[in-house]
């Protein structure tokens, strides 16, 4: 998912040839082509191609219907698939007429059936302004129309671009470069013309810039392609806009200022991508336009994906000036202030600029430059983009319109006046918004799963803010548009919450050392990119709105060595920063890294053989343990007694001290049990070498875990640190002993699942004590029988530790688990660690956080106490809206994690997320982040199953889907009641919830061991979103026919990108081999009649029969397919911190149930298939 | 917390036996003294996090944690006495055939029973759990509950007083 910042790596490598699937899918949108894959783009406001194709089928082409308006040739294309029930919300057509100026494009997402609605719109528009004529066009119409228009204007380009061409990516690729030039030329005319009218000078400018750009772009790779989609959109829009602008100036004085402002902003945003798009999409300029509106959002994620971490500083400044320019030029008095940080001016509620984020990290300076000219040229763009902004008054009425669109509502435009005032805006808005709002008929639409990984929706902010915003990997909100009031939130029936991954490993992190850390004086918010500078000396807090002084030191910018530019400081330029805290932040000296290992050495444990692996891993990683010269380490082993090891420097060999009084454990030699790692390294190594054999003949079967833990706590309490506990059975002696509570006969019960809660509060109390002493307890449970994880897990849950569970672990009988332990340990021992941490989450006044999920102790209502924090820990919080957010259009969330690094530095890592506030239900749905919502629901469901019952939790999950969908349907009143409709943004919701219901944690009716279930619950609570999603809904790829088509390049390696398959047995074929990525484990399933060449080339066996049952590695063979498979798998592996284990499963092997249980769309004896589940939901809704 | 001891030695409570057959006013004394300490305790839980820089201090963590545990422990200790005294009074109303009064108290009695039997499974802790109490929704719920109960007990107190006086007068 993450490509290094500025590097355009993957895309770049594949110029003419294969592209990433995403890219491949892209071209089609441009045209009306029928490619299904395109459907997949997860969130965008983009249109799905399917619709297009459908529409084209349905509607006879109506190209000629386009009526040139008197003054301008404006084509208003209404595309609706209302009839199809798949409405196409956004359509914008640009006709490239010989006279470029006149053409105007209107986006109308008009919901109506083409003719009637079209007519209506048309009428309205025309009445509003004589200038515009709306012509309803079906897609097919469009395409034809386009081509024709293109041909007329740009003959050279024209026809080659037809849909057929698009549909075949390869062809199109070849074609593109050629085309781009002409298209450019097309573009340039536009610019010129326009500029000549409005801003001649600018026009010039533009011209010059754009050309070089284009030429350069041709050779470029994927990245650019990505942008292209929007670009084209934006570009076209801009044209349109400018046209509009002209129009408005000339003809109507009525344009609202607000809209103008907004528009300008929009322009700025859209501007960057322009150059790029042009090239690619060029063929049918018009066509591209159409699709562009639609697809823009879609792309965004892609772009993001590719260039994720990149932060491009370049654009902000220019855009600012641009904005200013634009405003001026548009001759409206603008209230927008020139100050960069002034939100009011900048912030866009609009959907449109989806592209910005993606495009912003422009790979080359060129691209960033080019945009400007465009912006200049077309000052008034993008009215549509502003949804949430002040102009909402005008927009508001239209919101219902969105819905109605889908259903054939004719009365879209409430008033003529509004229409004229927001003319472009309205229609644009429609076109944009819809993609995420586009109703998807779930019961009919079988391919809702995108081919490429689902990406986080991009908040609907203007590009500047979006660029600054926190990465969705660290910080995600379930609703990227925050509802204004609790009432609205309640109406939407979606959970509101945040998912955090605050201590994630980052490739790039600005670390700031400064004597004063600038914080708000009243709410203690750290200064962040979303504050506004009132003037040079004062800033306004974005959470509590208090005005603070800018301290003297802050005026100096160490990066640029300039004075007086506080808004250029890194704190204000990055939403994720790390401060090195001053001594104010510590009451005692930072603690050293202290590690204590508590190892079970009872017969059971020795028999399982984990000691060898642990000691081996420790030996290997001893030098890599995070820490400094003060690092200390110690060991305790236990069976029915507790053994300590004196490792004091100077001893000739480690000394074992046995304490057999487990009722009152004491520390035999408190000073020499935890020793300095560097001073006693030899002794430690001796001990680690000796440990595995020391207990080899033990007969002791009891386990005194409780006393050992008490001892460990005593040992650690002076310093704090980390206790790693390895346990292999139910604790049977001393304090904290447990009894087996599981009745194996109840494992597959569909009724009550009991014992999800702890049996004793011993471990909880211990955890609290540990937490108080800044000690975290990490549990490794390696057990073959029931070990009451529900009780044991408490020791980690409340002390901010982590839990690992290896069911039926055995070093030789279960090599997969052994390998997993090994890999986990490697990561565990070497990963970053933060000690004595606290995390506080602040949010804008009016919002309040009410429930936390994760492993920690809640110290006060917004403060989490984390004895240790590790990079693999995720957190979730639920929020409510206490006061309505009427006086703000943005809300911010800030997480501040204060911790002691392993080097003994006190550091504060701050993440800030900024989201727009919306007032309409439609916008709330448009901004829903389905993955985040599902993860939050999963967390809530875990709580519910513990506090109430599992069946309650399951019902609650189903109800969450039923409620939100029925709420959506009721807002969109005219949808066909007979089918199950979801907004595009939530189309995966039922699927994910079904997957969740079939997850080990929540499933019933399938035999599930209690410990497995509890472990799954623990994971849900403590995993970050990315990993959790893989757990809930694994990715399935077909890997026996990997090709380089769509491949990306990483570090000089070609990584194929096979499309995602849906999790259904119908996708499996006996001839194929499939890879399932479940996050922590990869399954490769090989069909019975799998191609022998695959088995030979990739697995290294002559035929299917000779493939062993337990294969956990792919051999390094020197064949192309092997190389592809391996590079794909290692690419998947590299994208996550835990190194997943690979398991090859043959079709007849008993392990295949492991694989098949993840096929969540299929029916099992105890659970619905996906389709049945949909019917069930539909029934519930109708009730 | 002084409140708890106050409950036991409360003057009104000691008056209870004296009233003998007129047990109407008894439960006036019941739990309204038990509530103020709860509310104070919640208040204490709520505050404490006001000092900004201190919050980040590991040294404060322990103190704070102890505090929370102490308060939770106290709250937990109050639960059973409160519930049982209320139950006792319900029983007495039953014996005295004070149906109206009993009717007023029955809902609360059921609520108490429900709460008691829905407590977390792990043994000793009845409800106020140190690890979850600081979740704002739980804290708010508990606080609201205490206020409501306080109001209820107070109103019942005056009602019982009125009933008692009324009965005495009508003798």
Image (cartoon, coloured by chain):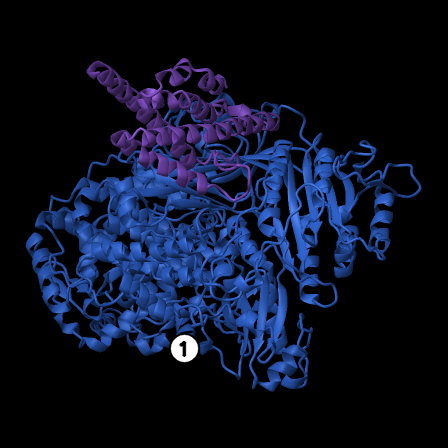
Chain colours: A blue, B purple
Q: Where the C terminus of chain B falls, by quadrant?
A: top left
Q: Nearer the viewer, residue B35 or A213?
A: B35
Query: Could you tell me if residue A61 is visible in this image?
Result: yes
Q: Nearer the viewer, residue A909 or A222?
A: A909
Q: Nearer the viewer, residue A726 or A1077?
A: A726
Q: Is residue A74 left or right of A162 when viewed as pictured?
A: left
Quadrant in the rendering for residue A960: bottom left
Q: Quick one: which residue is furthest to the right in this view?
A: A652
Neighbor class of circle 1 (other Cα within 10 Å; few <14, some 14-19, many 20+) is some
Chain ID of residue with mark 1: A
* Residue with the mark numbered 1: A171
Residue A276, placed above or below residue A470: below
Q: Position of residue B83 (x, y in %)?
A: 42, 31
Q: Position of residue A1183 (x, y in %)?
A: 24, 60
Quadrant in the rendering for residue A547: top left
Question: Looking at the image, which residue is at 28% across and 21% down?
Answer: B160
């Amino acid at each position: 998912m993450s490509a290094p910042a500025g590097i355009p790596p993957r895309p770049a490598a594949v110029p003419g040839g294969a592209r990433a699937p995403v890219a491949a899918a892209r071209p089609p949108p441009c045209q009306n082509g029928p490619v299904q894959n395109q459907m997949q783009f997860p969130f965008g406001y983009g249109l799905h191609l399917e619709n297009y194709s459908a529409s084209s089928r349905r509607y006879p082409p109506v190209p000629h219907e386009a009526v040139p308006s008197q003054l301008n040739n404006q084509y208003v294309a209404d595309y609706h698939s209302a009839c199809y029930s798949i409405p196409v919300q956004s359509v914008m057509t640009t006709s490239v007429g010989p006279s470029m100026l006149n053409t105007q494009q209107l986006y109308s997402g008009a919901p109506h059936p083409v003719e009637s609605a079209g007519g209506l719109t048309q009428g309205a528009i025309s009445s509003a302004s004589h200038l515009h004529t709306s012509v309803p066009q079906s897609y097919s119409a469009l395409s034809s129309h386009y081509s024709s228009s293109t041909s007329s204007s740009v003959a050279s380009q024209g026809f080659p671009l037809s849909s057929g061409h698009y549909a075949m990516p390869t062809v199109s690729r070849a074609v593109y470069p050629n085309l781009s030039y002409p298209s450019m030329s097309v573009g340039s005319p536009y610019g010129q013309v326009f500029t000549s009218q409005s801003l001649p000078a600018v026009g010039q400018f533009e011209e010059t810039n754009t050309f070089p750009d284009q030429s350069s772009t041709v050779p470029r790779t994927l990245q650019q392609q990505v942008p292209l989609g929007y670009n084209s959109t934006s570009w076209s829009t801009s044209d349109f806009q400018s046209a509009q602008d002209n129009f408005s100036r000339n003809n109507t004085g009525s344009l609202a200022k607000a809209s103008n402002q907004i528009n300008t902003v929009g322009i700025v945003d859209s501007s960057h991508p322009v150059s790029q798009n042009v090239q690619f999409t060029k063929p049918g300029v018009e066509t591209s336009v159409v699709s562009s509106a639609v697809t823009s959002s879609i792309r965004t994620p892609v772009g993001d994906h590719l260039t994720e971490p990149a932060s491009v500083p370049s654009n902000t400044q220019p855009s600012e000036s641009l904005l200013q320019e634009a405003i001026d030029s548009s001759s409206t008095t603008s209230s927008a202030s020139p100050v960069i940080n002034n939100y009011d001016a900048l912030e866009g509620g609009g959907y449109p600029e989806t592209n910005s984020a993606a495009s912003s990290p422009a790979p080359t300076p060129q691209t960033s430059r080019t945009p400007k000219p465009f912006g200049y040229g077309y000052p008034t763009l993008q009215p549509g983009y502003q949804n949430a902004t002040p102009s909402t008054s005008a927009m508001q009425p239209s919101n219902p319109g969105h819905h109605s669109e889908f259903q054939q509502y004719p009365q879209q435009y409430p008033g003529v006046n509004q229409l004229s005032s927001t003319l472009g805006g309205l229609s644009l808005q429609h076109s944009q918004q819809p993609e995420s709002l586009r109703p998807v008929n779930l019961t009919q639409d079988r391919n809702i799963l995108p081919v490429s990984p689902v990406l986080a929706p991009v908040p609907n902010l203007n590009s500047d803010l979006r660029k600054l915003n926190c990465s969705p990997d660290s910080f995600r909100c379930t609703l990227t548009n925050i509802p204004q009031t609790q009432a609205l939130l309640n109406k939407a029936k979606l959970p509101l919450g945040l998912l955090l991954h605050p201590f994630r490993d980052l490739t790039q992190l600005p670390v700031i050392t400064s004597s004063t850390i600038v914080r708000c004086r009243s709410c203690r918010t750290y200064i962040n990119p979303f504050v506004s500078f009132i003037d040079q000396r004062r800033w306004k807090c974005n959470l509590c709105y208090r005005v603070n002084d800018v301290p003297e030191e802050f005026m100096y910018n160490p990066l640029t060595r300039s004075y007086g530019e506080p808004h250029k400081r890194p704190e204000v330029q990055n939403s994720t920063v790390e401060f090195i805290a001053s001594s104010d932040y510590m009451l005692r000296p930072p603690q050293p890294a202290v590690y204590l290992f508590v190892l079970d050495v009872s017969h059971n444990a020795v028999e399982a053989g984990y000691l060898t692996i642990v000691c081996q891993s420790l030996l290997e990683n001893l030098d890599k343990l995070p820490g400094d010269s003060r690092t200390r380490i110690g060991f305790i082993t236990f069976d029915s007694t507790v053994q300590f090891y004196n490792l004091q420097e100077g001893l000739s060999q480690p000394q074992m001290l046995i304490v057999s009084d487990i009722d009152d454990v004491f520390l035999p030699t408190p000073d020499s049990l935890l020793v300095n790692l560097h001073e006693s390294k030899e002794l430690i190594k001796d001990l680690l070498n000796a440990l595995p054999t020391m207990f080899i003949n033990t007969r002791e079967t009891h386990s005194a875990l409780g006393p050992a833990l008490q001892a460990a706590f005593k040992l650690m309490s002076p310093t704090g640190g980390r206790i790693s506990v390895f346990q292999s059975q139910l604790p049977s002696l001393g304090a904290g002993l447990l009894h087996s509570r599981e009745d194996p006969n109840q494992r597959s019960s569909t009724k009550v699942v009991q014992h999800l809660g702890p049996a004793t509060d011993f471990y909880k109390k211990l955890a609290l004590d540990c937490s108080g002493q800044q000690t975290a307890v990490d549990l490794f449970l390696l057990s073959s029988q029931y070990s009451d994880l529900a009780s044991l897990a408490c020791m980690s849950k409340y002390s901010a530790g982590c839990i690992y569970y290896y069911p039926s672990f055995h070093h030789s009988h279960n090599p997969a688990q052994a390998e997993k332990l090994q890999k986990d340990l490697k990561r565990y021992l070497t990963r970053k660690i933060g000690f004595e941490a606290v995390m506080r989450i602040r949010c804008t006044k009016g919002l309040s956080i009410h429930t936390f999920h994760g492993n920690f102790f809640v110290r006060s209502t917004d403060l989490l106490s984390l004895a240790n924090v590790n990079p693999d820990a995720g957190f979730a919080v639920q929020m409510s809206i206490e006061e309505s957010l009427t006086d703000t259009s943005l809300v911010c969330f800030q997480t501040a994690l204060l911790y002691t690094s392993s080097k003994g530095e006190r550091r504060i890592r701050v993440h800030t997320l900024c989201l727009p506030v919306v007032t309409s239900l439609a916008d709330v749905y448009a901004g829903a982040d389905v993955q985040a919502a599902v993860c939050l629901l999963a967390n809530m469901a875990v709580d519910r199953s513990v506090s109430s019952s599992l069946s309650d939790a399951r019902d609650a999950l189903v109800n969450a889907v039923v409620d939100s969908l029925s709420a959506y349907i009721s807002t969109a009143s005219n949808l066909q009641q007979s089918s199950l409709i979801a907004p595009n943004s939530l189309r995966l919701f039922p699927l994910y919830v079904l997957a969740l219901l079939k997850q080990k944690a929540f499933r019933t009716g399938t035999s599930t061991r209690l410990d497995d279930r509890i472990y799954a619950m623990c994971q849900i609570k403590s995993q970050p979103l990315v990993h959790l999603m893989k757990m809930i809904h694994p990715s399935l790829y077909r890997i026996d026919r990997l090709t380089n088509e769509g491949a990306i390049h990483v570090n000089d390696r070609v990584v194929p990108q096979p499309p995602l398959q849906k999790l259904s047995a119908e996708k499996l074929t006996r001839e194929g081999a499939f890879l399932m990525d479940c996050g922590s484990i990869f399954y490769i399933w090989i069909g019975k009649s799998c191609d022998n060449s695959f088995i030979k080339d990739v697995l290294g066996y002559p035929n299917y029969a000779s493939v062993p049952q337990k294969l956990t590695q792919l051999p390094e063979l020197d064949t192309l397919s092997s190389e592809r498979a391996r590079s794909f798998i290692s690419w998947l592996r590299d994208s996550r911190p835990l190194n997943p284990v690979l398991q090859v499963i043959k079709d007849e092997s008993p392990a295949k149930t492991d694989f098949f249980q993840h096929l969540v769309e299929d029916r099992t004896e105890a659970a619905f298939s996906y389709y049945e589940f949909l019917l069930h939901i539909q029934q519930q809704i109708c009730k | 917390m002084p409140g708890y001891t106050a409950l036991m030695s409360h003057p009104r409570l000691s008056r209870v036996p004296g009233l003998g057959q007129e047990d109407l006013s008894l439960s006036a004394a019941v739990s309204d003294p038990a509530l103020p300490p709860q509310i104070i305790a919640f208040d204490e839980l709520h505050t404490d996090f006001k000092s900004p820089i201190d919050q980040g201090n590991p040294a404060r963590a322990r103190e704070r944690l102890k505090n929370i545990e102490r308060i939770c422990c106290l709250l937990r200790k109050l639960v059973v006495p409160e519930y049982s005294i209320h139950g006792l009074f319900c029983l007495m109303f039953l014996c005295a055939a004070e149906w109206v009064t009993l009717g007023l108290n029955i809902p609360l009695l059921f609520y108490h029973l429900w709460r008691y039997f829905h407590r977390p499974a792990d043994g000793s802790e009845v409800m106020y759990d140190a690890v979850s109490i600081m979740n704002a929704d739980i804290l708010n719920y508990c606080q609201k509950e205490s206020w409501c109960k306080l109001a209820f007990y107070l109103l019942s107190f005056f009602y019982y007083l009125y009933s008692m006086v009324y009965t005495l007068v009508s003798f």
